[in-house]
Amino acid sequence: MDRILTTHAGSLPRPDDLVELVWARMDGQDVDEDALEARIAAAVDEVVRKQREAGIDVVSDGEMSKPGFSTYVEERFTGFAGRSEFQADDVAPFPNLAMRLFATDSMAHVVFSNCVGPVEVKDPDAVTRDIEHFRRALGDAPPATAFMGAISPGQIAFNYPNQHYPSHEAYLEALAGALRHEYRAITDAGFNLQIDSPDLAMAAHCRSVGSSIESWDTHLPLAIDALNRALEGIPPEQVRLHVCWGNYAGPHHCDIGLDRILPDVLKANVGTIYPEGANPRHEHEWAVFKDVALPDGMRVILGTIDTKSNYVEHPRVVAGRLTRLANVIGAERVVAGTDCGFDTFIRFSQVDPGVAWLKLRAMSDGAELASQQLF
């Protein structure tokens, strides 16, 4: 490496007509599946092109085929039904804010259900279709310059309360087994795999009613163990682990500190960890790495762009965030990223789609400035 590379957390704004098709299918309407698949493929082509134009080095498929970074599991796995209720301690004291954030048409299409039966792969070809769309969009670019996201066992257990398995541990074990298919398909195709696991931080201040998670500090090591079992045989250097505190515009004053969860997070068999580092609640936590010895070869994707604000960060702000971490852990270990996705669930975004692309360009420009100082 002779410069700081750029990437992001995966989800990017979907085209409006694609959103309408996906929502129609979710609502039980008749949808021409061939037409939907063709529109997904075209959207992936477009989003890859736009990422390259914005200066992104390690690109994603934008999660064009998924209704949400986690809610896609109901389409691809058996065992889920009904509807669960989600709670966030930081938003609960502010009912007007809760209504503004969550009582929306978009949130009506964000459905977390319950685990009511065995979790098994229902549509093994879904990830294959995603891979083929992405491969075509990349053209001659090596697959190592790209990544695809997948949910973690712990995040499913966090969002989808267990009403079937005899224990939380048994639930996590079943989820790890089911997710291996998706993980292996992505890495066997040569792509980097991003594991999305907000539960590792969010379980301290959020929950699904009826969840088998008794407390964040007991869930955390169990979730990491389950993830490691799901990743067995996959080279760690192909895997990045994204941790966040929830991509919603709440006060976040109940968020647990990165220092409290990092010792367990570092036990994951991954080559890269990916925490937030740009928003007002967590920007200071780059300093945690002064007191932590990273495993040999591990890199850090640092969130340098806030995905909950329409402010476009100045490239010098991005450069400053990157250089101060690089001065602690070494520039060769630092990659620039966004705090989270720009379209975590379809249309559940605080940032205007056009502004999102401005932010990505600012991040690329900031990484270039930081590289000039560091290399």
Image (cartoon, grey):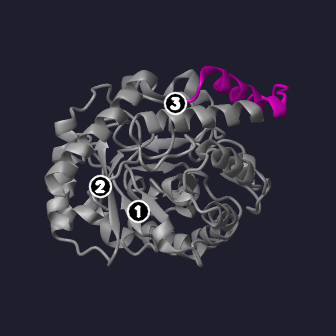
From the top left corner, tell me how far across and down residue 303 is, in percent.
31, 48
Q: What secondary structure is marked by label 3?
A: loop
The three-letter amino acid code for the residue at tag 3 is Pro
Question: Can residue 113 be seen in the rendering of this structure?
Answer: no
From the top left corner, tell me how far across and down residue 364 is, in percent.
32, 40
From the top left corner, tell me how far across and down residue 157 is, in percent.
57, 59
Q: Which residue is mark 2?
A: 256
Disc 2 crowd, CA 10 A, few/some/many (<14, 14-19, 20+): some
From the top left corner, tell me how far across and down residue 50 is, in percent.
49, 32
Q: Earlier in the sequence, mark 2 or mark 3?
A: 3
Disc 3 crowd, CA 10 A, few/some/many (<14, 14-19, 20+): many
What residue range appears in magenta?
14-36
Q: Which residue is mark 1?
A: 216
Which quadrant of the figure contains the C terminus? bottom left
Q: What secondary structure is marked by label 1?
A: helix
Residues at circles 1 and 2 in contact by the CB criterion of under 8 Å: yes
The three-letter amino acid code for the residue at tag 2 is Ile
Q: Which residue is mark 3?
A: 13
